[in-house]
Amino acid sequence: MSDKDPSLRRNAPRLALHVPEPPFRPGDTPDFSALKVPAAGVAPRPDTNVAAAETHALTTDLVRVLGDDNKAIGPWDPKLDPETLRKMLRDMVTVRIFDDRMYRAQRQGKTSFYMKCTGEEAIAVAAQTALDREDMHFPTYRQQGLLVARGYPLTDMMCQIYSNKGDKLKGRQLPIMYSDKAHGFFSISGNLATQFPQAVGWAMAAAIKGDSRIAMGWVGDGATAEGDFHSAMTFAAVYNAPVILAVVNNQWAISSFSGIAGAERATFAQRAVGYGIAGMRVDGNDALAVYAAVKWAAERARSNQGPTLIEFFTYRAEGHSTSDDPSGYRPTNEAKSWPLGDPIERLKAHLLAIGEWDEERHAGMTAECDAAVRAAQKESEKLGILPEQGKDDIGSMFDDVYAEVPWHLNEQREEALDEGRD
Ligand SMILES: Cc1ncc(C[n+]2csc(CCOP(=O)(O)OP(=O)(O)O)c2C)c(N)n1
Ligand SMILES: [Mg+2]
């Protein structure tokens, strides 16, 4: 450094940046004892028509319903009938089995890519159970539970994953990037967070049209660092849009831990405070808490009280995708040490605790889900698996894009078809 360097002439501390590092790396023993986990039943439940600021204490709290005794407790207990609880459990088990089979299908070379949601099944399944059939989701790639809970055919999901002849999207989307308007499931985009402002825009349009349906937008903890997250929050706040904005904080964004997106400074739910909208933080592995929070936010949106930001606190129990190997960046036993447990085990334990379930029924139900997934796989594989998809239909890539195909694209189609024939 030269004498002319101004920093040498200043008697001031040297500036430095903080680069967040995850607390545990491979080889470390994960220790979550510093994590504050409030007891179930303690968080207050404000009326759905309160001023947004009255919810803000919930943004640093954790709404939990299932207690250590596996019973439901406190004002957030949604008091669901056993039939609904069993349906949620079945859907969550189906999602897990589906994920396992599709993961294996990828490893067997039947498709190029898959993403599991292991450990996060309660979030999508319970959220959908709390909403109406007609409400519109703007999901990420980790909410397959929404489709399962809405009764979307498993075969159709698999055909999309295999990009085969039964794929309604004709192989134009990456595997698992489903789209189905009739099932209120907006096309998944690989560009993170784009769906967040779209959810708000759809909700605003619903209000402008005098509709009664609401929208739910989904984003991961990592993707909250995108500008789109903030645009969505601004529009939702300004226009009091009838939308539920969900942040699924599974603590990882591929190999980046949530601190890189700001989690060391504030909870993701606390971002609601700065925008003046309602917000809360919820135990994402507690299906009853997820259901109750979404029901609350839906009632608020439907009665024109405005948007709600909900952070679902969870843990991504497996790799980001089939292209990822988490053992390179976090301890392999971290998921097992995670104190909020497994969402399926917790809901099952609740049903057992209230005398509405037994091990035999659970085994029977699991076998039924397994059979349904296997049957769907067999059915979809009859229509092809990814490596079998040839160039036979190459001309179709120009279909469904223009009402009238421009002449130069017609020319290109002919050329492509000629090449394909060579
Ligand atoms: C705009 C954009 N940036 C980066 C990526 C690459 N990418 C895909 S998924 C992902 C991690 C997202 O993490 P998070 O939002 O926490 O969601 P999660 O995968 O944990 O569900 C990244 C960085 C992308 N698809 N789009
Ligand atoms: Mg994440």
Image (cartoon, rainbow, N blue to C red):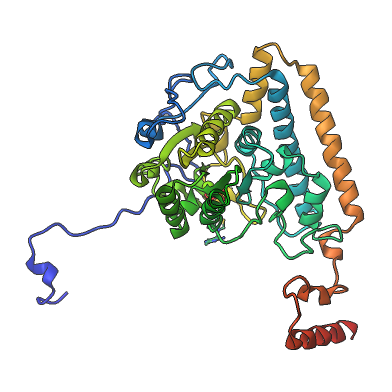
293 or 364, which is in the foreground? Answer: 293
Percent x, y of residue 142:
63, 47
Q: Residue at x 68, y 41 (%)?
A: 145
Can the viewer see residue 159 in this picture?
yes
280 or 266, which is in the foreground? Answer: 280
* Residue extending furthest toward the front: 210
Can the viewer see residue 60 in this picture?
no
Vertical position of residue 238 compared to residue 396: above or below: above
Q: Which quarter of the rendering shows the C terminus?
A: bottom right
In-image side of 404 versus 230 (left or right): right
Rendering quadrant holding ligand 1: bottom right
Percent x, y of residue 393:
86, 73
Q: Which quarter of the rendering shows the N terminus?
A: bottom left
Percent x, y of residue 348:
68, 22
In-image side of 342 versus 17 (left or right): right
Q: Give the tally of numbered discs.
A: 0
Vertical position of residue 280 compared to residue 201: above or below: above
351 or 80, which is in the foreground? Answer: 80
362 or 293, which is in the foreground? Answer: 293
Vertical position of residue 346 compared to residue 265: above or below: above
Q: Residue at x 18, y 59 (%)?
A: 14
Vertical position of residue 261 compared to residue 403: above or below: above
Percent x, y of residue 331:
53, 42
* Residue extending furthest toward the right: 382
